[in-house]
């Protein structure tokens, strides 16, 4: 069975060497946790024994890269990712034979880029799909992340940037209440990925710092801290060269980690591929 070594890279939380206190053995355990989630069809399931999905597969590919692991069967993984693409629309579906959507298309570009199989034809098809189908902010946020992965821009960037800016608070942040840091981080990153220079940066940075919760993570407007929200904020911190309270952050990540090397999206939940990638 052919294997692909993905090499040790920065962690998904993107502050990697600064945030991580993990020894090489800990990284190896995380890689060993993710690799068995690959199914015979080449894709990865989010949980042990779960059906393959493009989202879980993309997360697994990047988690293995970030931990120095290997895809057990890289050729079947490439085949699975490509089988999710709909040539007619240029988009990707969440699983082979499904209906293409914006999120799956962005995730497909990310996976294809990591597997070194993305090409100009694929990127052009995705750009056209996004132009026809992107609607609200969440579509914009994930679409620009996918395009960043293949180093492409969309002619829709000015309209998308205006849409993101339209939701901004007078002080320069986004969102309200306990979820303001998450919303601000996500919006700021989307604009930066489109090449938009941010104004009122001091207010943005203050929002990110103030939104860090006592447990060290960040969360949505309702509920506790979670890795998905923390990932969004830390991506913004990285791009803006800001450092929050890293000691508290390390504590939150440690509480999400389980003895088998996997990470749960929230402390106490079951570890899965997505949480392990987002840590």
Image (cartoon, helix red, strand yellow):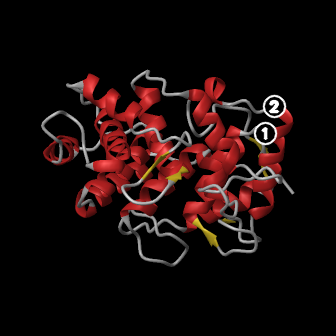
Q: Who's the residue at 62% across and 54% down the image?
A: 275
| Residue 116 appears in the picture as rendered | no
Judge the density around disc 2: few (<14), some (14-19), many (≥20) Cα neighbours within 10 Å: few
Q: Quadrant where the N terminus lies?
A: bottom right
Q: Who's the residue at 72% across and 62% down the image?
A: 76
The residue where tag 2 is placed is: 23
Specify the label residue 153 is tagged with: none
Question: Do callouts 1 and 2 mark residues in contact (Cβ within 8 Å)?
Answer: yes
Q: Nearer the viewer, residue 169 or 131?
A: 169
Residue 146 percent across, percent down from the top left: 43, 48
Above-or-below relation of 211 to 139: above
The residue where tag 1 is placed is: 27
Q: Nearer the viewer, residue 88 or 140?
A: 140
Above-or-below relation of 88 to 36: below
Residue 55 percent across, percent down from the top left: 55, 61
Q: Quadrant of residue 279?
A: top right
Judge the density around disc 1: few (<14), some (14-19), many (≥20) Cα neighbours within 10 Å: many
Q: Please, what secondary structure does the residue beneath circle 2 have?
A: loop
36 left or right of 226? right
| Residue 79 appears in the picture as rendered | yes
253 left or right of 230? right
Give the alpha-carbon distance from disc 1 to disc 2, as whole Å: 7 Å
Q: Nearer the viewer, residue 83 or 233?
A: 233
Above-or-below relation of 20 to 86: above
Residue 114 percent across, percent down from the top left: 59, 44
Q: Quadrant of residue 207?
A: top left
Q: Please, what secondary structure does the residue beneath circle 1 have?
A: helix
């Amino acid at each position: 069975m052919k294997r692909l070594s993905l090499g040790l890279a920065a962690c998904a939380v993107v502050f990697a060497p600064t945030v991580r206190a993990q020894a090489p053995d800990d990284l190896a355990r995380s890689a060993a946790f993710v690799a068995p989630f690959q199914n015979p069809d080449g894709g990865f399931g989010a949980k042990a024994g779960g059906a393959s999905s493009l989202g879980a597969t993309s997360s697994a590919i990047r988690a293995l890269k970030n931990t120095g692991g290997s895809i057990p069967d890289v050729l079947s993984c490439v085949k699975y990712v490509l089988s999710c693409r709909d040539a007619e629309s240029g988009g990707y579906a969440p699983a082979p034979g499904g209906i293409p959507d914006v999120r799956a298309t962005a995730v497909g570009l990310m996976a294809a880029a990591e597997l070194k199989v993305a090409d100009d034809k694929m990127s052009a098809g995705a750009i056209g799909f996004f132009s026809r189908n992107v609607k609200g902010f969440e579509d914009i946020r994930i679409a620009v992340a996918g395009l960043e992965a293949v180093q492409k821009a969309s002619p829709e960037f000015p309209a998308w940037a205006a849409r993101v800016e339209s939701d901004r608070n007078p002080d320069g942040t986004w969102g309200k209440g306990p979820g303001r840091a998450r919303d601000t981080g996500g919006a700021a990153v989307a604009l930066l990925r489109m090449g938009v220079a941010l104004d009122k940066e001091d207010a943005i940075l203050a929002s990110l710092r103030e939104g860090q919760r006592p447990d060290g993570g960040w969360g949505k407007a309702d509920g506790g801290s979670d890795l998905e929200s923390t990932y969004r904020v830390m991506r913004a911190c990285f791009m803006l060269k800001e450092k929050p309270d890293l000691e508290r952050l390390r504590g939150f990540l440690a509480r999400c980690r389980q003895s088998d090397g996997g990470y749960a999206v929230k402390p106490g939940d079951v570890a899965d591929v997505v949480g392990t990638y987002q840590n």
